[in-house]
Image (tube, rainbow, N blue to C red):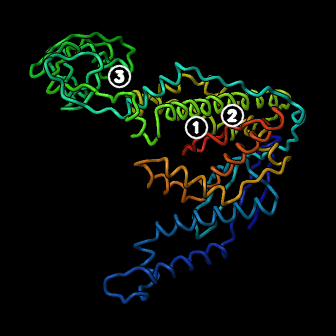
């Protein structure tokens, strides 16, 4: 292996790596020997297919596999031999991939900046004063009743009212012609502004069950849903059934159904839950404020590749919110990119905060064990509901487990800083916060 090193800036490095032909041939021989043992070709016994025939049928696949393996292996080797720690995985640019001649490629990356964080040990912040009102407790109990509610068919009324649940079908028309993408077959819907887009709640309110109702609505040219943007739409809706959401009474029986001996005990637990939630939120704000003070006191040069990665992450998050609101994937990302300056600012803030917290973790010797990571993954999977299998599969990846471990290390570091800043006995939100599957660092806020 021949390696040349080029420094294009204080943090950026370019490794140009050329793998010797003998090393390439050894890997090709190994790959074809493995293939020969596993593949079955007509007319040949297992393990007896000639190399030339394998090259004819599988040459492109083998070539790609060998290149990927050698690039990874020799990039890691070159980084280790030169004591380089990239802040983000190197960008690989291939220059010569004719394996009969050579394999030559470049690995471009940024080094993690050397950083000693100063002026953070003596920062102080007051512990949050938490107060939960009787009105908040009542609202929490009301939410609990809503969750226990059941749908009952409406009797004695044939028209739709606000907050009803209906089984309905609808479709949008322009000049008498159906608009693609607007048709919805029989679906259970809650009739409210919060749950129905495009003003469809107003279309349904007052509609009679069993008949068709028609109502025109106009949408501006810049409306988020492109199928109806700039159009005068006639919505045609047919309500099949009307239901109301019946909730249980707040009484001793309800408390026993929730697993409590009395209504007073249920109220007490609701208050404890709200206090824990408020404390978690207050401590999250305190941690973020503490971090912003530390970042302000410790300027750091940002590696461009780290900012680029965070920029992609922020754009993806914004686009995902647009998609959740009903926008198509392409339109959501195009809309997100309109805020390029804001995205760049947020990405730089995340990158800077992450570097600072990681450096403090090193200075404070903060560690997260594999057992702690396994326990957190178990919690995440438990909370994942129907997505449990997908989440479990996500964390079978070593890369994803490493990202979670880094997140947990940052959490632990910020918790330690907050405990120190608030003094002895400060309650930490980490004890009451529920786990998430996002892997987002507390330094990302």
Left or right: 325, with 159 as reference point: right
Left or right: 381, with 13 as reference point: left
Please determine whether, in this image, residue 282 is positioned above or below residue 100. Answer: above
Left or right: 155, with 226 as reference point: left
User: Looking at this view, is 232 or 389 the one in front?
Assistant: 389
SS category of the residue bearing label 1:
helix
Mark with earlier residue (1, 3): 3
Q: List x then y, in percent, for residue 319.
A: 48, 31
SS category of the residue bearing label 2:
helix
SS category of the residue bearing label 3:
loop
Please determine whether, in this image, residue 415 is positioned above or below residue 225. Answer: below
Q: List x then y, in percent, for residue 398.
A: 60, 59
Residue that label 2 marks: 350
Residue that label 1 marks: 313
Mark with earlier residue (2, 3): 3
Instruction: Tell me what residue is drawn at x 80 percent, y 43 percent.
Output: 11
Q: CA distance from mark 2 to mark 3?
A: 31 Å
Q: Quadrant of residue 74?
A: bottom right
Q: List x then y, in percent, for residue 408.
A: 68, 47
Which quarter of the figure is the C terminus placed in? top right
Q: CA distance from mark 1 to mark 2?
A: 10 Å
Residue that label 3 marks: 225
Instruction: Tell me what residue is drawn at x 72 percent, y 56 percent.
Output: 16
User: Looking at this view, is 47 or 50 the one in front?
Assistant: 47
Q: Is residue 323 visible?
A: no
């Amino acid at each position: 292996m021949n390696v040349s090193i080029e420094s294009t800036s204080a943090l950026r490095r370019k490794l140009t790596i050329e793998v010797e032909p003998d090393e390439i041939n050894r890997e090709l021989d190994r790959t074809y020997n493995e293939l020969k043992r596993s593949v079955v070709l007509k007319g040949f016994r297992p393990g007896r297919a000639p190399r030339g025939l394998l090259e004819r049928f599988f040459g492109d696949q083998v070539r790609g596999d060998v290149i990927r393996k050698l690039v990874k292996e020799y990039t890691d080797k070159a980084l280790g031999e030169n004591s380089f720690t990239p802040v983000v995985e190197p960008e690989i640019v291939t220059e010569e991939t004719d394996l009969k001649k050579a394999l030559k490629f470049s690995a471009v990356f940024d080094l993690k900046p050397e950083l000693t964080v100063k002026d953070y040990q003596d920062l102080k912040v007051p512990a949050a004063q938490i107060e939960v009102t009787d009105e908040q407790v009542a609202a929490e109990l009301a939410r609990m009743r809503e969750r226990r509610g059941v749908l009952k068919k409406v009797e004695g009324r044939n028209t739709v009212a606000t907050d009803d649940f209906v089984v309905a079908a609808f479709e949008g028309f322009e000049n008498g012609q159906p608009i693609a993408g607007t048709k919805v077959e029989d679906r259970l819907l809650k009739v409210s502004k919060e749950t129905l887009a495009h003003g469809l709640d107003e279309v349904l309110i007052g509609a009679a069950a069993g008949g068709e109702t028609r109502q025109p609505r106009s949408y501006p040219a810049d409306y988020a849903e492109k199928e109806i943007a700039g159009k005068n739409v006639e919505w045609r809706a047919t309500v099949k059934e009307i239901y109301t959401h019946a909730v249980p009474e707040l009484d001793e029986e309800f408390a026993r159904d929730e697993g409590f001996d009395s209504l007073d005990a249920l109220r007490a637990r609701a208050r404890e839950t709200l206090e824990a939630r408020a404390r978690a939120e207050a401590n999250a704000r305190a941690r973020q404020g503490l971090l912003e003070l530390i970042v302000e006191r410790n300027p750091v040069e940002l590696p461009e590749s780290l900012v680029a990665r965070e920029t992609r992450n922020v754009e993806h998050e914004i686009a995902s919110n647009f998609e959740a609101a009903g926008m198509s994937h392409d339109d959501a990302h195009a809309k997100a990119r309109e805020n390029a300056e804001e995205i760049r600012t947020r990405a730089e803030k995340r990158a800077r905060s992450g570097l600072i917290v990681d450096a403090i973790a090193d200075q404070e010797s903060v560690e997260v064990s594999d057992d702690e990571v396994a326990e957190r993954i178990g919690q995440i999977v438990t909370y994942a509901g129907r997505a449990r299998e997908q989440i479990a599969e996500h964390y079978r990846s070593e890369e994803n487990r490493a990202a979670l471990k880094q997140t947990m290390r940052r959490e632990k570091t910020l918790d330690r800083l907050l405990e120190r800043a608030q003094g002895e006995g400060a309650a930490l939100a980490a004890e009451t916060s529920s786990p998430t599957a996002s892997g987002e660092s507390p330094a990302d806020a």
